[in-house]
């Protein structure tokens, strides 16, 4: 399945692009109407001089370096840990080969995810599993990740689409938000009812309070702005 041409709703080949933001693709007007309840929260007009923010053309690079996060896969975590701060230079592959995370675009915090390892077929190397990356890539419409993200996602680099610094604490909060959705609600059409920018902000506030209750001196969570 090619992510470059996926419909944002049904993942069939997309031939229609949102005329405003030039990002989301759809296979039909029907899918576009279905997706509007989510898309309207993050649909932002993009000047034609910037080009479309899509998988094929990539994200126009920022002139300066951006602070992002590497999320290591299972095989790397014993030596490197889970989250590793990283500097993303304007020449980084994330700008050309990154994937938009639909869930976080829907809740108002668009991120771009770049996988370090090639896509594995069914029964790929389990040591490349990365549940965090899988959770980040679930779809807001039904809670399911695309097949290429369901296993062996490998190590990934993540950045905010707006270029603002992404911290390990913010990344952890986003992971826990996605995990909480999956634990709390059934996968399927009703999943979408529980995804909104307001619910995301409220979860971030609760999670930050819980982390500080456990460790009041945790500088990362003390300094984490909410909304993110």
Image: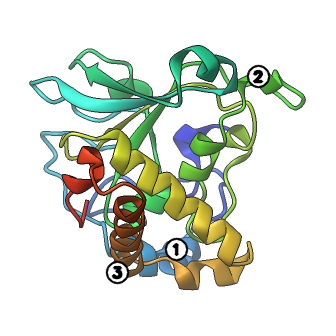
Q: Quadrant of the N terminus?
A: top right
Identify which residue, 223 or 62, lies in the foreground.
Answer: 223
Q: CA distance from mark 1 to mark 2?
A: 41 Å
Q: CA distance from mark 2 to mark 3?
A: 36 Å
Q: With respect to residue 204, does 148 lie above or below?
A: above
- Provide the secondary structure element on which disc 1 rests: helix
Residue at 13% x, 50% y is 47
Give neighbour class at mark 2: few <14, some 14-19, many 20+ (Cα, 10 Å). Answer: some
The numbered dot on residue 127 is: 2
Q: Earlier in the sequence, mark 1 or mark 2?
A: 1
Residue projecting furthest to the right:
123
Q: Which residue, given by chain and number where applicable, does mark 3 sit on?
A: 198
One can see residue 55 in this view: no
Identify which residue, 158 or 32, lies in the foreground.
Answer: 158
Give neighbour class at mark 1: few <14, some 14-19, many 20+ (Cα, 10 Å). Answer: few
- Provide the secondary structure element on which disc 3 rests: helix
Q: Is residue 176 left or right of residue 222?
A: right
Look at discs 1 and 3 and give the one toward the viewer.
3
Q: CA distance from mark 1 to mark 3?
A: 28 Å
Residue at 61% x, 60% y is 179
- Provide the secondary structure element on which disc 2 rests: helix
Q: Earlier in the sequence, mark 1 or mark 3?
A: 1
Q: Position of residue 27 (x, y in %)?
A: 58, 61
Q: Earlier in the sequence, mark 2 or mark 3?
A: 2
Judging from the image, the colouring scheme is rainbow
Give neighbour class at mark 3: few <14, some 14-19, many 20+ (Cα, 10 Å). Answer: few
Residue at 49% x, 80% y is 33
Q: With respect to residue 24, does 207 lie above or below?
A: below
Q: Is residue 100 left or right of residue 163?
A: right
The numbered dot on residue 29 is: 1
Q: Quadrant of residue 83?
A: top left
């Amino acid at each position: 399945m090619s992510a470059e041409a996926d419909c944002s709703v049904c993942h069939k080949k997309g031939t229609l692009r949102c005329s405003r933001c030039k990002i989301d693709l759809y296979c039909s007007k029907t899918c576009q109407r279905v997706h509007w309840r989510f898309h309207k929260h993050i649909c932002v007009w993009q000047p034609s001089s910037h080009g479309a923010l899509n998988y094929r053309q990539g994200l126009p690079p920022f002139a300066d370096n951006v602070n992002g996060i590497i999320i290591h896969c299972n095989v790397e975590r014993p030596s490197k840990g889970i989250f590793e701060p990283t500097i993303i230079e304007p020449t980084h592959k994330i700008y050309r080969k990154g994937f938009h995370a639909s869930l976080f675009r829907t809740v108002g915090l668009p991120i771009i995810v770049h996988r370090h390892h090639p896509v594995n077929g069914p029964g790929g190397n389990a040591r490349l599993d990365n549940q965090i990356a899988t959770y980040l890539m679930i779809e807001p419409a039904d809670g399911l990740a695309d097949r290429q993200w369901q296993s062996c996602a490998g190590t990934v680099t993540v950045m905010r689409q707006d270029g603002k610094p992404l911290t390990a604490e913010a990344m952890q909060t986003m992971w826990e938000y996605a995990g909480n959705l999956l634990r709390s609600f059934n996968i399927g059409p009703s999943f979408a009812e529980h995804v909104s920018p307001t619910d995301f902000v409220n979860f971030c506030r609760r999670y930050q309070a819980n982390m500080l209750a456990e460790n009041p001196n945790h500088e990362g969570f003390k300094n984490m702005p909410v909304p993110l």
